[in-house]
Amino acid sequence: MFPNKKSKKLFFWTIELLALALLLYVVLRFDFVMHPVSVFISTVFMPLLISGFLYYLLKPLLKLIEKVQIKFWKISHNLAVILTFLVFLLVVIGAGLIFVPIIINEITNLINSVPSFIRQGREITDQLMYSHWFKRLNITVSEDDLKNSINQYASSAVSITAGTLKNVIVTTTTVTLNILTVPIILFYMLSDGDRLIPAIQKFFSNRHNDQIAELAGQMDQTIERYISGQAIQMVFVGLSMSLGYWIAGLPYIWLLGLIAGIANIVPYVGPGIGVIPALILAIPLSWKAVIIVLVAMAVVQQITGSIIYPAVLGKSLQIHPLTIMLLLLGAGNLWGIVGMILVVPVYAISRTIVLYVVAMRNIDKL
């Protein structure tokens, strides 16, 4: 029936994959089975994601501490983990004591300033309607209709703000649980991270141990360099844009800088999204403020794109910009902002695996 063993093996693998796909399709149709699973995954996913991000951020520090040697005494792995974790806690507590009150104060002031923004919008609209160049356009606009539209958008803005505050209050419990859970997960990741590769090797034969260790090392290096690079970029963009906002005379510079830094985690699209709140606040001030904000964004992105990004990531993430744009477009439509954040590192890891497997096959043929 089969011309050779290879065809027979391919046939049975195809049947098994089709059976597995059919089983998954049937299981996914039962909501009473998948709903608890989806709730569990969504609950566990965020703490694991944050802990993994912090793990790769602290891993270089852990390696550096492990290399410290005082005469004939060398720091053990467990002691290095404790010291690394203490440094992390000190940084978090210090940043919390310094920046969190400032951010909370700016958020409170921003919420209290919403009526003032609405009033400024009405004044700008009135100036626009009675300006000479607007009258030359011969556009007939009812003043009452325009004011009603402004009031409608203002009401929508207030309701959105209220809804956002409501969501913040509702999710306070979840955030608190994450704050308590993440440090515990992070500590165990730092402590037992070096046991991951041996655990994976147990699932394969001994003759593949070297290949598994090499591939896992390449994947680990890719993730580490990507996360370290993104963290450095986020801090640099946040501080630099805050400086630019201060020069432009904008209020809430630390809050706006925080938004710009976090938004920068999404390649190419993030910087444009992160500067929108600053532009909204700059427009009522002056065109000079708008120009300064745009110039600051252009300078910061030029520095990150030409200096920081290549220096930190190097050759570990050689992905064409068009490929990244297509990945972001697809992931954004399928999974939203979380997909846009995760799609690039997932693609980079998959690319590393495929290139390694292809290279190994070519070596075997030789």
Image: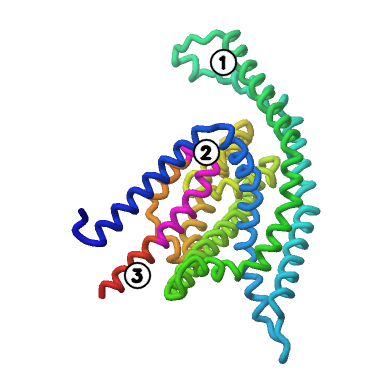
Residue 137, by quadrant, is top left
Find the magenta span and give its range: 332-353
- Residue at 61% x, 57% y is 52
Query: Is 224 contained in the magenta span?
Result: no
Q: 30 above or below 154?
A: below
Q: Nearer the viewer, residue 41 or 262?
A: 41
Per the model, the C-alpha gap separating discs 1 and 2 is: 42 Å
Residue that label 2 marks = 336
Whole-percent x, y for residue 93 in the image: 78, 57
In space, the residues marked 3 and 2 are separated at their CA atoms by 36 Å
Residue 348 is inside the magenta segment: yes
Above-or-below relation of 210 to 184 = below
> Disc 3 or disc 1, which is closer to the eye?
3
Give me the disc on residue 130. Answer: 1
Asked whether the viewer can see residue 247, the reply is: no
What secondary structure predominates along the stretch shown in magenta?
Answer: helix
Q: CA distance from mark 3 to mark 1?
A: 73 Å
Residue at point 72%, 44% (across, down): 175
